[in-house]
Image (cartoon, rainbow, N blue to C red):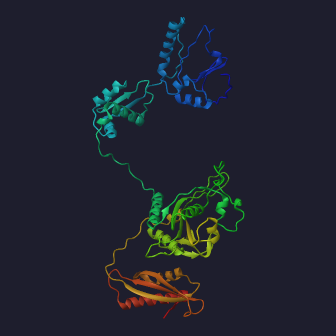
Amino acid sequence: DGVVRPLAPERLLITDAAGPIAIAGVMGGAETEVTDATRAVLLEAANFHFVSIRKTTQALKLPSEASARFGRGVPPSAAVPAAMRATELMRELGGGRIARGVADCYPAPQVPSAVVLTTDEVRRILGMELSRAEIERILTALGFRCEPQGETGLRVTAPDHRLDIGTGVTGAADLIEEVARIHGYDRIPVTEMADRLPPQRDIVPVNLEERTRDLLAVAGLQEVITYRLTTPEREAQLSPGDDSPAERAYVRVANPISADRVVMRQSLLPGLLEVMAHNARLRDRLWFFEIGPVFLPEGPLELPAEPRRVTIGMAGRLAPASWRDPDPARTDFFDLKGVVEALLRGFHLGAARFEPTTHPTFAPGRTARLLVEGHEVGILGEIHPQVRAAFDLPPGPACLAELDLEALLARVPPTHPVVGVPRFPPALQDIALVVDDGVTAADLTAVIRSAGGPLLADARLFDVYRGQQLPSGKKSLAFSLVFQAADRTLTDAEVEAEKRRIVEAAARRLGAELRA
């Protein structure tokens, strides 16, 4: 057509001694086209792989009648009959004179592939019994060549024109489809699935992650999925006062689809805050969580690290307003802490501590880091007012937690002991200990549990008091203690001895005094 087209090395050409004369299976060149002055014609009948023809047609944007036929697949065995038929038509209709001889270049003729099909395989796929004779009758009628194979099998060879029949397992499925089509889909009985399931392997990280979702859903949170693309400026809003967001290393997108999706996220918090801000217009209770990867650059020539995180966001009222409670309480830090503790209990992680810390995203004095077995696995707290304003959240406390999911799940014990139901009643005791303001409830709880020994079943903080009845710089922490033995009912003397041991240990290690 007079257009110059560059050709990639994988494009097939038909050539002679002088150069290319046609694009194989697509279109001939101008030098070899037939005109009114043509007196001699050399017929070439060839076969090309249909995928190659389709790719060439699409790449060159050169559709033709030839490519439409070759692109659907033509059997190699059709080349010689097609050449003979074309020669005969030229003789009959054009008065041509046929030269003697045929040149054939087919050094590696295609060997028809055979598929072994058994009656057991037909029964497994179709759910019905068909005899070998019936299967052979159907396939033979369709042009397949069938030979007996063993007692229940057939060795089936597809006719040349059935290029859609595969080999191996795929070929067997193709043949069974042909059998079902001719036998009649309406004659296949309705049966329950009776095949054996393949052996299932436990993928522990995936199972634990699903368990995380279940525990958070049970706690009343809804899962969300946010974009993995963001901007440095958006993530910088988590750190008020940081004026250089672009200096932080990010995994950048080479061809971003929009200006607000240019880098891979390094935190799940911005996306979760956007979800909370959007839903604040629709509901009062904003309890959400997300599990997903963050992307941390490792180097210019290395793929980024993709550690998985779990983020929890909680804000709004604890319950909808009603006639009984027109002004329900709002979510605070301790509601978030309770959800995190429920997650830890669900994984039987007992050695966990919350320690005060500071972080630019969270309000001063309302931030804690979570340690499991002495390793920091996350941070939680009430977000800073400037962060809340930057993400257009409504007034009121909003709390977030971001945990390193991989570090957390790596410390989940593979098994945990199951304690039997107690047969004997517990003994309940309350104590109030006066300690310095710098002593945390977690420190005092650890001392109480350590000193209580096996008879101390539980110790819970239920009151914190600061006031005129105590010296300056002091506070009172009141605990409810549960003593219980598995083999007997404890006496008052035993309980009193355990209580005295706890008070002495608290005085010795933390300077605590028993409040009268």
Image coordinates for residue 185, horizontal then vertical, percent: 32, 35
The total number of labels drawn is 0
Image coordinates for residue 466, horizontal then vertical, percent: 55, 88
Q: Quadrant of the N terminus?
A: top right
Vertical position of residue 104 compared to residue 193: above or below:
above
Which residue is located at x 47 percent, y 20 percent?
77
- Quarter of the image for residue 137 reads top left
Which residue is located at x 32 percent, y 28 percent?
138
Image coordinates for residue 240, horizontal then vertical, percent: 67, 68
Which residue is located at x 40 percent, y 33 percent?
174
Vertical position of residue 195 compared to residue 507: above or below:
above
Q: Nearer the viewer, residue 483 or 494?
A: 483
Q: Residue furthest front?
A: 323
Image coordinates for residue 362, horizontal then vertical, percent: 61, 71
Q: Nearer the viewer, residue 427 or 396?
A: 396
Q: Is residue 163 visible?
A: yes
Q: Is residue 359 visible?
A: no
Q: Nearer the viewer, residue 310 or 513?
A: 310
Vertical position of residue 36 compared to residue 244: above or below:
above
Q: Is residue 363 left or right of residue 214?
A: right
